[in-house]
Amino acid sequence: MDNIVGQKSSLTWVVNIAAAALVLLWTIPTFGLLVSSFRDRDQILTSGWWQSLFPQEASVHYRAGAPDTAVQEGGLYVIAGNVFDGAGGVVSAFGTNSRDPAAFAAGETVQTNDGYELTVSEDGAYRLTSAVPFEGTRGERFFVTTTQPPTFTTENFVKVLNAEGLGRGFLNTLTVSIPATVIPILVAAFAAYALAWMEFPGRALLIAAVVGLLVVPLQLALIPLLQLHLKAGIGKSYIGIWLAHSAFGLPLAIYLLRNYMAGLPRDIIESARVDGATDFQIFLRIILPLSFPALASFAIFQFLWTWNDLLVALVFLGSTQDQLVMTGQLKELMGSRGGDWEILAASAFISIAVPLAVFFAMQKYLVRGLLAGSVK
Amino acid sequence: MEQFFGAATTIVIGVGGCLLYFFLTNMLLDRIFPASGPNISRNINRANAVRPWLFLFPALILLTLYLVYPLFWSIYLSVMDANGRAFVGMSNYAWMVNDPKFLESMRNNILWLIVVPALSTFFGLLAAALTDRIRWGNFAKAMIFMPMAISFVGASVIWKFVYDFRPEGQNQIGLLNAIVEAFGGAPETWLTHEIVNSFLLMVVLIWIQTGFAMVILSAALRGIPEETVEAAILDGASPLQVFFRIKVPQIWGTILVVWTTITITVLKVFDIVLTMTNGQWGTQVLGNYMYDWLVRGQDSGRASAIAIVIMLLVTPIMIWNIRNARKEMR
Amino acid sequence: MTAKFLASAAALALLSGAAAAQDVKFPIGEGAFNWDSYKAFDEKYNLDGQKITVLGPWLSVDQELFQSVIAYFEAATGADVEYIGAEGFEQQVVIDAEAGSPPDVAVFPQPGLMRGMAAKGQVLPMSPEIVQWTKDNYAAGQSWVDLVTFPGSDGAANTFGFFYKVDVKSLVWYVPENFEDAGYAVPTTMEELKALTDQIVADGGTPWCIGLGSGGATGWPATDWVEDMMLRTTTPENYDKWVSNELKFNDPVVVNAIDQFGAFAKNDAYVSGGAGSVASTDFRDSPKGLFASPPQCYMHRQASFIPSFFPEGTVIGEDADFFYFPAFAEQDLGQPVLGAGTTFGLMKESDAGRAFIEFLTTPIAHEVWMNQTGFLTPHKGVNTDLYGDPTLKKMGDILLNATTFRFDGSDLMPGGVGAGVFWTGMVDYVGGKSAQDVADSIQSTWDSLQ
């Protein structure tokens, strides 16, 4: 007996560790994106996200105050300031020439190319002095090797959340995705029941056709379908996109649900039939409640797909400011050439929130019990 | 707000309408062929012949309009010229078989079809089995599911940064190269290494699809009647034996479904390849190649011809599924 | 000031009915703008209640700028213009047109797509007046017209587009202070540029940052290089023949131009990260090397839009600047300039749509945008003092001093080549294939297009 318990607890350990390893492996890339979403673009492109969690040594150039900020001190013109501009850090070296940016140790006083005297101390304070007035409009450029504590910014999120039209986009997306999730589930559930439990000629062929239709590439379907919508008078409207999303999700829904329903115990259905229940009653009272785990898992995926979709929305709903869904709004933020990685990172986390909430909400329907109870 | 009510009304009308349709048509059927009276057995037979089609009707209409019709449209376009204006016979197909990029795509697709569904299903099953046994299972599931919730483009950006390359001596911002450097290796431009890069792209899809496999398989695992498991444990089976001998055979149908679905996702994949390499350095796949000719090449004929090939590739999977369905019915 | 503005606004309100209550960027009647052209247009049109949609590729900043131009059209005519910026413009316009619901006006980022759509009869020809106006009033007017003259669905050639907003591509970006620190001078000939490149290497530096990565469009920056090299190694006539494939892609002239690009990009010592990293470095990240400390490179050849990817706070003209990508002194080809531009096309017949195109010929439609940022124009009738910043003016000068102006060739080639194998071919080329092999395979794809 002891032996079995011992085995069990060691097995529990193995399971826990294995699960932790798997979770870690799967989250590291996403975690990197999360960290990146709190950094600005220049940071993202100059150091790895994991480095941002620790103090960082970097070589950067800094521009001293403009000549008109100089003050006179006993016959000398002085421009003073701090390279960290308020944030903390340590300067280990500095330089005045781009070819040798770490020529001098912090604290030394050196001549610049233009004949000024420059000193940068360890705490980042710099002092540029000259016997004659400074010239030009731009401050003197010099180089510092710094070690700075991690710095993060919430600016990306502020920018995304404040974006014009995002609220509207959010509403539009909800308007698209909720009906586009509910309708196909219902339609598919009836079809799946027929394919799983009703006898009729051509059933196997229909199942195969559903599998085959999963593979029809969406891109090629867009033009003929939009033509169809325009001819039918639906045009670019919510009805159009609901129908389109429902239909595109249907093969997977039927396929998943049929498989699940076919696996339900035969005796329940047979005995209900014997009791005189019609198929409609069997479906509503027995099959539908028993299929909740499958319905919930399909709902999650269909919701996800409509939530993250941009292509279908642009084609069937249109892209004017009023019609744009959230993914479209976020894409616009990224500009015509789309290199704003920091915006992408922040918006990915904003748009992930709702699907994740749906996942958690649906998770309780994924449990067993419904089935176990009814078999007994 | 108005829009919100509009959506709510739609849900009510849509759902109510569907239910009403099923309810009314079924009632009508029972009226026409009542399961009573003198012709009871004939009526029941007739009703049973009609009823499946009542259940299937809305689904069939949607599928026909939105998927079957475009399918035939694609077949038609594949024998037309670039603009879909003039008939060109089989010349798009003839072009295809001689096109080196197409052959490269076929080769890569076969690799993808072997690797991605197998590993995604394997990891999904592993994740489902492990997370069902631990206390923080729901949290773990959410974490593994998360990649699924990030759009394909978002996922591609994440992995672009993982594979990023900076010359030796500069600060690596790509995780992979940072790890390589930490172990004393030299950084690589991973995405330009033929063969290796294809596998690196597959990793992205596996990373995404594992969440899908996990959710479906986990639901199936929980659907296994407890009695069978309990009986096996009483017989002294070890947990591993219970899993492989009792549980896996019972969810075999679901594993097939997951495998099939991921296989089809693989056949259609293009976003990952498009955003990460655009099919260069030997990573082209059929989905992206079709997209390329459709959007860049402005040639709906060639694009459709490639699409037809993709659809033909699904045939073995269809046959496999028919056979499986037939087996179930017995 | 305010009183004057109110007065002019009131006067305008009288002129154009009720429509002048628009928010316009610059008060009408003030500054060095050509307000006469605005008033003349205002008097000519009254389109109250008409509505048109314009579909284009401009997003975020560009979208706001273009909308500031539209505001004047709306104020003048009373028409309502809805601009839609589309992320995937190419795909969207094709789908909409094929399905039968095109926008009234579309803004094509390059003429290649327009050619294809015109051939299907999806774009309407410009009126003869607009065509004649372009010939007369744009610098090198005939060449702009030629770029958008294609066979229509009936096979007859017609002019389908109107150019508005031009970009200059033959620019080399650098950090003046880095040049100063090292004692380098801005080269004025290609020979000097090559000497400078070697000089930098000899000094232990890396001269160039080159990045071809662009996600799904990886490779395109190399096509600009090759086009610039074509213009610098052969005649403009040959360039035109190359674009129309009269001169084969694998002709020695073209192969030579590709190798001229390779002389820079395929030399490990010349490029930051070595030749192997050129193809995979993102073009948006590539210029960052100019600003690193110590500099990872000293020069970066890219079009006029690239400053939006410089580190935040970079001041153009001070922290970073550009010079003309010079021509060979020994080749007597003058000062060729490579450029690109957006062209407007009418997708549906409408009075307001036609009027909108006509509005774009008025100086005011150009001046409003050029006084802000990111806009160059070949319009001879505008006040060039209005360029919003000295950088734009300097680019405008490069455009004016050009002895030859040629449009981005890859944009004029069929999509399967110009946005397909030309890109991928260049990636193969920097990856190690020979120029001849790459050119052969590009030509064979071109041959295979019907």
Image (spheres, rainbow, N blue to C red):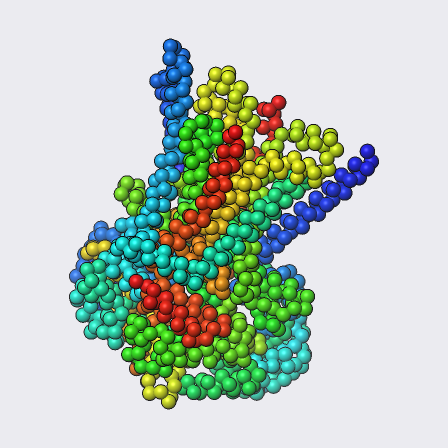
Q: Position of residue C346 (x, y in %)?
A: 24, 59
Q: Position of residue A128 (x, y in %)?
A: 59, 80
Residue at 60%, 34% (x, y): give it: B250
Q: Position of residue C139 (x, y in %)?
A: 26, 76
**Whether residue C344 can be seen here:** no
Seen in the picture, residue C62 relative to A302 is either above or below; the reply is: below
Q: Quadrant of the N terminus of chain C?
A: bottom left
Q: Quadrant of the C terminus of chain C?
A: bottom left
Residue at 35%, 75% (x, y): give it: C338
Q: Quadrant of residue C359?
A: bottom left
Most foreground residue, A337 or A114: A337
Task: Locate residue C174 relative to residue B222 in the image: left or right.
Answer: left
Most foreground residue, C367 or A344: A344
Q: Position of residue C401 (x, y in %)?
A: 32, 81
Q: Residue furthest bottom?
A: C330
Seen in the picture, residue C253 relative to B318 is either above or below; the reply is: below
Residue at 54%, 41% (x, y): give it: B256
How many numbered marks, from 0 up?
0
Task: Locate residue A49 relative to residue C236 in the image: left or right.
Answer: right
Residue at 17%, 66% (x, y): give it: C128
Task: Locate residue B134 relative to residue C324 in the image: left or right.
Answer: right
**Whether residue C62 can be seen here:** yes
Seen in the picture, residue C177 relative to A204 is either above or below; the reply is: below
Most foreground residue, C314 or B61: B61
Q: Residue furthest right?
A: A2
Q: Quadrant of residue C88?
A: bottom left
Seen in the picture, residue A276 relative to A238 is either above or below; the reply is: above
